[in-house]
Amino acid sequence: MKILIANRGEIAVRVARTCREMGIPTVAVYSDADRAALHVRSCDEAVRIGPAASRESYLLIENVINACRKTGADAVHPGYGFLSENARFARACKDAGITFIGPPPEAMEEMGEKTRARRKVIAAGVPVVPGLKEPIPEGGEEAAKKYALEIGYPIMLKAAAGGGGKGMRLVENPKDFDSSFATAQREAMGAFGDNRVYIEKAVSRPRHVEIQVFADTHGNCIWLGERECSVQRRHQKVIEETPSAIVTPELRAEMGRVAVNAAKSVNYVGAGTCEFLVDGNTRHFYFLEMNTRLQVEHPVTELCTGLDLVRWQIDVARGGRLPWSQEDVVRNLRGHAVEARLYAENPAKNFLPSPGHIDELRLADGPGVRNDCGVESGSEVPRFYDPMIGKLAVWAATREQAIDRLKRALSETVVKGITTNTMYLKRVLDLEEFRRGDYDTGLLAHASERLLAQPASPDEDLALAAAAIWQFEQDQRAAFKSAPAASDDSAWARAGRLAAMGRGR
Amino acid sequence: MKILIANRGEIAVRVARTCREMGIPTVAVYSDADRAALHVRSCDEAVRIGPAASRESYLLIENVINACRKTGADAVHPGYGFLSENARFARACKDAGITFIGPPPEAMEEMGEKTRARRKVIAAGVPVVPGLKEPIPEGGEEAAKKYALEIGYPIMLKAAAGGGGKGMRLVENPKDFDSSFATAQREAMGAFGDNRVYIEKAVSRPRHVEIQVFADTHGNCIWLGERECSVQRRHQKVIEETPSAIVTPELRAEMGRVAVNAAKSVNYVGAGTCEFLVDGNTRHFYFLEMNTRLQVEHPVTELCTGLDLVRWQIDVARGGRLPWSQEDVVRNLRGHAVEARLYAENPAKNFLPSPGHIDELRLADGPGVRNDCGVESGSEVPRFYDPMIGKLAVWAATREQAIDRLKRALSETVVKGITTNTMYLKRVLDLEEFRRGDYDTGLLAHASERLLAQPASPDEDLALAAAAIWQFEQDQRAAFKSAPAASDDSAWARAGRLAAMGRGR
Amino acid sequence: MRYHATIRGEDRVVEVTTREGGYRVVIDGRALDVDAVHLKGGGLSLVAGSRSARCDIQPGKDGKLDILIGDTIHELELLDERKLRMRKAGGKFSAEGPQRIDAPMPGKVVRVLVKVGDEVTEGQGLVVVEAMKMENELKSPKAGKISELLAVEGAAVESGAKLVVVT
Amino acid sequence: MRYHATIRGEDRVVEVTTREGGYRVVIDGRALDVDAVHLKGGGLSLVAGSRSARCDIQPGKDGKLDILIGDTIHELELLDERKLRMRKAGGKFSAEGPQRIDAPMPGKVVRVLVKVGDEVTEGQGLVVVEAMKMENELKSPKAGKISELLAVEGAAVESGAKLVVVT
């Protein structure tokens, strides 16, 4: 088996790691903007598949298939995003005799378009949020507005082909409908090449809780516990955890059973995730959609189950049976895991993306820490793709210890050259609503001011001293510029060495 | 509580991490050789305690106590090595009203000198290796030689105050006795300031298996499973794993029971480790010694139990009760963990230590990987201390997967500027005896030639190309040296960026 | 060496001299003996008294420095006598006079919300730029009139490209 | 540019020229089109055909280079025409003639096993140096006679310090 990883960034690196451990050779694909990206040098082979724009590279089925042919790859791992939920791609692989590591195209189609998916799962007895099940047709805006008034605001506008919060818009009241509709359509087109959107009632005090399911080709299908992803900003997940503070063993079993039914209703195979909205008060849960691929936040599930989900994906794609029964899962669930997403963005400037050159990257280490990163020191973060540069996940025996550990790990995580959300993440972990586990998808919006406050620090004098000493050394060294200069870097290093040798003592 | 960490390197950094997670302020101590060391900037405060030589700094009780007084630290974590097993230090802390995070001085004394320890545990019904229980007195060489002949060669010469394999010598036959005796004494003096050594029979096909025990101040004492440390070179542990391939649940329970008895026989408190020699054939086990401190290899126990042993040490030192019963331990043991020690040494030059400047350090990441490192890019490895710069530990569901994972992680681990044993470690993991789990403490000695072989590689042309291209760029850039040169570093980075932008495409 | 610093809106005078084993830093008259070690990547390991801190330093434009210590980023500005004089001569930048709105990062203009001659209020949206699949609305820094408009819908723009001028 | 390389004892001629999108490398006549990206820290990311490899490069003394690819360190020597001529002129270094034994790292001399005038055999122990609590015996590279002895028991020595000369 040789696996081509049809993706980029941290997920491509993560998949390559498991392949390396399994002794399976890997092929990377890259656009012109990614030649120097970490995932390219993390694989045994690499093939250029086009210019920077994803629509001309990572989203081009033909180029990916050709890359397989060129390298003799007989399997493709799609990661998440890009072609991972594209049934045409899955079919193209099949036709080319390439194993697509994911569900069968039929299952992807059933679940791929949310409106169809809802019809399907409702038939399987899965509860859903009230809403218009059809995309709004050309010129159907007025009918849509009328319906919106019927089910009552606030409503959601969602991309029919969407997922991951992209192309989703909350509409608080009727007067915003038109502008939000236009934006939702544009974003949908940009993200999925399909501008259709549909209407859904927005549940109040909603919590986003999703169930990881796994099925093999022998009819076995189990759930692997939940992930709470209610810490979202503009429908982008920021922090995920498992177990969820509101999920009891009974609720877990019930949601798991429903999720497995949803999966079975489309003869699902491989790793999948059923997203639910849970009412924070009634604990009623509603099926939102099924993501027919590995999830960004899968590491928290791996940390609490001890599984390697990519290994399972590969084994299942080879026709293997699930090694665990549902009871094994329940018996093996352990401790608490929390994941924080590192974004190249500037929270102080309305989360403006900040692509650019990473001068230095220091990741956290030590007990219970897991890094999944798509960049390293010296990496370029291109402006063409998602701003997530990596994920920091931790495990500990209890939720409180896990949060303290994640905070410690974030303090060790330093990215220089570009602006990231690390400080913002630490503040989120300190929100008392989050600490209490009493939060919903509105948390970040409600806390936005607290999260951006600039509290005074006792270290101000130290900071001034550091700045002055640093500038002083700069000015001193400027004087020597003419001299045969060794590199900055080794100059610093020398200074460090001198000090290490006890300069002046 | 404020904790002074009376140590350096990776263990100081590791202890500081747990303190940070518990919200406990920390104080580092450093010698002149360590001012620029990572552990200094990992703590909230730092105090210089003397010149480079450990005997004048890290081993000086008075200076450590003064550092506590200066900073108001009311507790000391001694780590391992240095003063960690020094009862006088534990007493000095007590007298100064400082909590020593470790066992009571009496227990340290009982176990501190191996000969006394043996007498004590034999009384508690613990099996030991036949040997002379008293250090060889001045001028007692002849008597010692006669005794050696009685119990029969091969024999061991061990430092009475020793530990960690330091000052231990295997003597294969009588004619080597004198030279080995001299070396053993010299190394004992150098390492422990005490040159006394004693004789012990060397067990054949011996495997080094140790049991982690933990006791609180309320009379509770439990075992936390074993660690196999038979992969040793000159009695220095190189790779450790848990569970051991030869330990059945029954044997584990039996060894655990014996270890707990040994600990109870000295009213032990805190984290301790009972080292046993296990006969590879008969599975009989013999008590070697008890290490009255946290062990270098404690992470593998943490990975398979899910515990943070440093957190437990601190809680117990505060008078807390062990939160787990022995049954909880057995229920929570999970999967397999392997640790590799990273040494600054050159296996090709008879493992010559290679202190110096680390130009670049890249650590492994991804699923199941844990780094405990005392250095980072730009760090200096001083020549005055132990050559271990860090530890790489992994966890996986099975032994095979754990070994594959460790190998993958070692491939991601790159240390530039100094020579390390990373390649050597990868070869050890590939030894079929190790893969089979069928090995003893002689493994590395027997396999030494296989471990140093230089197999041909298919990448030779790539290597030549890389070298030529690198040199070519050097030569090109040399031409520009006169021009207003930016730093090497940013020049590389620019080149990288150019390429990232698709130079020439 | 003598520096004029601004931190959290306050001006400070910071003097640095080398001394045996490190530096003496005097902040508004308060002396601080600091042992500093330079780290790879340009950071500093400071020991002042017994306090130990790792400082990561991110230099910005015209004297701006971000200093990361623990969980706080200290944003400050540092000028020596000469730069200070130049600054004084130049006068501080403010929302008075014509304001130029530049592209804050490389991206694509998806919408232009104004045309030349429009009266705009402070905070009113002017242009929407998309990067990394996110839309970002650029707002007017002041009330005034659109005197220049270079942004074109659908056009790719580099970071710093002039988009609009409000007078 | 033309280089003369030695790898695993074999001599190779390697020519490098830049080409659109990367380099052309000709090894003993075999052409290899290589796309190379320089990484921070001096490493290279190579793509040759579809093969992708990360190469870490550790430069040593007089043209020696260690190239780490995957799990193999390729130890090689690279000389351009000029250096090659100098080398030829100088003649290869060998165990012929007087051999100087230097301290391989900083440490302390714990034992001197020979005295001036002693006849020694190849591989015979000469001096024991201790560093990082480990003892390391330095052996004679050839059979001969001790002509110089600078090592003194108990003395600290820096890396490269001359200890013994065997003639």
Image: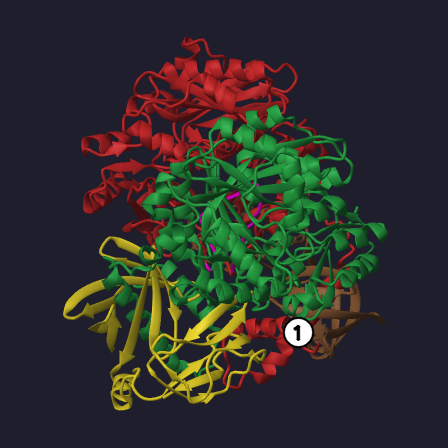
Chain colours: A green, B red, C yellow, D brown
Q: Quadrant of residue C27?
A: bottom left
Q: Position of residue C132 (x, y in %)?
A: 55, 66
At label 1, which amino acid type do we have?
Answer: Gly
Mark 1 burial class by Cα count in 10 Å: few <14, some 14-19, many 20+: some
- At mark 1, the secondary structure is loop
Task: Write the start and end of the magenta stretch as one range.
Answer: B360-378
Q: Nearer the viewer, residue B66 or A360?
A: A360
Q: Is residue B298 at all visible to an observer of this figure?
A: yes
Height in image: A206 above or below D102?
A: above
Q: Is residue A91 magenta?
A: no
Q: How many marks?
A: 1
Q: Nearer the viewer, residue D108 or C29?
A: C29
Q: Position of residue A108 (x, y in %)?
A: 71, 47
Q: Position of residue C49 (x, y in %)?
A: 22, 56
Q: Is residue B102 left or right of residue B380?
A: left
The C terminus of chain A lies in quadrant: bottom left
In the rendered image, which residue does mark 1 sit on? B502
Height in image: A192 above or below A90?
A: below
Question: Residue at the location (55% across, 83% down)?
Answer: C152
Q: Nearer the viewer, residue C21 or A412?
A: A412
Question: Residue at the location (39% across, 30% down)?
Answer: B293
Q: Quadrant of residue A51?
A: bottom right
Q: Position of residue A24 (x, y in %)?
A: 74, 46
Q: Is residue A50 left or right of residue A363?
A: right
Q: Is residue B130 at all visible to an observer of this figure?
A: no
Circle 1 chain:
B
Q: Is residue B377 magenta?
A: yes
Height in image: A325 above or below D139?
A: above
Q: Nearer the viewer, residue B111 or A271?
A: A271
